[in-house]
Amino acid sequence: MLKRFPPKYAYPEELEPFQLKGLQWTVSHAWRNSPFYRKRLDVAGVAPGDIRTLADLSRLPFTAAEDLRDNYPLPLLSVEPKEIVRIHPSSGTTGKRKILCDTQKDIGDWLCMFARCYEMAGLSREDRVQICVGYGLWTAGAGFQWGAERFGAMTIPAGPGNLDLQCTFLQDLRTTVLCCTASMGLLMAEEVHTRGIRDRIHLRKVILGAERTSDAMIATIKELLGVEEVYDIPGLTELYGPGTGLSCRYETGIHYWADYYILEILDPESLSPVAPGEIGEMVYTTLGKEAVPLIRYRSRDLTRLVEGSCPCGCILPRHDKILGRSDDMVVFRGVNIYPGQADEVLSKMEGVGSEYQILIEHGEDGKDYMTVKVERANQLNEGYDAVLARTIAGGMKRNLMVSCAVEIVPYGSLPRSERKTKRIFDNRRY
């Protein structure tokens, strides 16, 4: 399937030996060149020569966002500063930003990964890629643009927002591929619908990144833009940026580039592996990153591994879509709730629109209360609201084991955003 940017191994049974070689290089490189990693590995009692099998990965210490912030401005650096060709801060909003560095090789690897995404999405060099994500310090704009250029397609660096300009480019430049956050994708789809220009655009595919998606949101984007294929691309600044995996056209999960990093799915509390198919935290170890290698980096993102082979024939393994973050979890009446779980429940229900909000309040009686505000599907008669509300409340109770009030609101009445949309609001003040 992937001919121009194929996996670095030919058969599934070759993956473990390939990853072991990369793991051994990473531990040796970090131990020799990073004072931080040298100290951390020494404390753990692990030396490079101790890594003999992939099972030895469990002996390595974890790293986390705090390590990046605490060692500001150039944390975990494992090369001489003169080898750095670019920096990308994360989009964090508290304290010092996490600044990640790249060597020329790191940039080259990232662009090959991103070009692989475009190839997996079925693009050709005849495609025209309109990029509607943020530019500047962040990895998003740089990754989407230079990845498309590396692939060889025409690139339109439109940036986020400015719907007039976006719609003009869609029509005049005959854009065939739209790259954006899920929220921006929904905003664009509704704008195209409002302006009545769907028959005057030439979109074939949409690639969504940097934000959780729901089945309802994807269905709305497909319908309003008239596209058949919507792809999900994960992204983490610490791990190069977006472009480290992509869903395929069969929509059975996200193929991740296991020839560039090892992905563990661990219980956020015990940090032990979860059972196959269970939700856990994504923990990354890079296999060839020079400037800032990652060793068991806790991303806080939640997903589950998808077992078995994919109908698309790609041998690269899969994980599910990002279901939320372990530090975004809310505890409601003793039940742990992740944002992605609500997405899953609502996406399976007919009559539900593409946006929702969950509000959690602490009542005067000392109890916690949850209200789920859900848009009804476009053109659905409000006479069905009572039935829809009962269905949603039943689904939340059955799947998440929580009781909630449900408020059905008109389609388009909840906030939209060109970047990321917040959907869970914990307003409790004890």
Image (tube, helix red, strand yellow):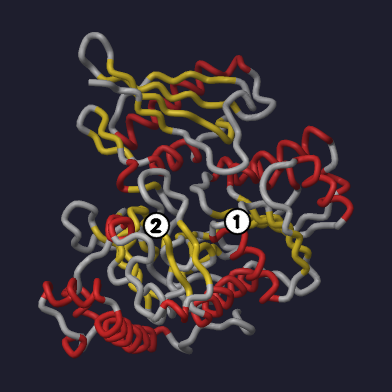
Residue 277: tell me if it is visible.
no
Instruction: Classify 397 as above or below 188.
Output: above
Which residue lies under the disc numbered 1?
136
Reading the chain from its start, which is encountered first: label 1 or label 2?
A: 2
Disc 2 on helix, strand or loop? loop
For image coordinates 77% across by 55% down, the residue present is 203
Where the C terminus falls, by quadrant? top left
Q: Amino acid at mark 1?
A: Gly
Percent x, y for residue 384?
A: 57, 19
Instruction: Classify 146 as above or below 391.
Output: below
How many numbered marks have been drawn onto this rendered protein structure? 2
The part of the image, by quadrant, that contains residue 194 is top right
Question: Taking 285 as reference, is 238 left or right?
Answer: right
Q: Amino acid at mark 2?
A: Lys
Q: Nearer the viewer, residue 402 or 416?
A: 416
For image coordinates 86% across by 50% down, the residue present is 171
Disc 1 on helix, strand or loop? loop
Q: Nearer the viewer, residue 212 or 36?
A: 36
Which residue lies under the disc numbered 2?
98
For image coordinates 35% across by 46% down, the residue present is 95
Instruction: Classify 112 as above or below 92.
Output: below
**Residue with the most extreme front position:** 82
Distance of mark 1 from mark 2, alpha carbons? 15 Å
Percent x, y for residue 290?
A: 41, 80
Q: Nearer the viewer, residue 76 or 160?
A: 76
Percent x, y for residue 237?
A: 46, 61
Instruction: Classify 68 as above or below 341.
Output: below
The part of the image, by quadrant, that contains residue 363 is top left
Residue 199: tell me if it is visible.
yes
Q: What crowding class fits label 1: few (fewer than 14 Cα within 10 Å), some (14-19), or many (20 or more)?
A: few
For image coordinates 60% across by 80% down, the residue present is 2
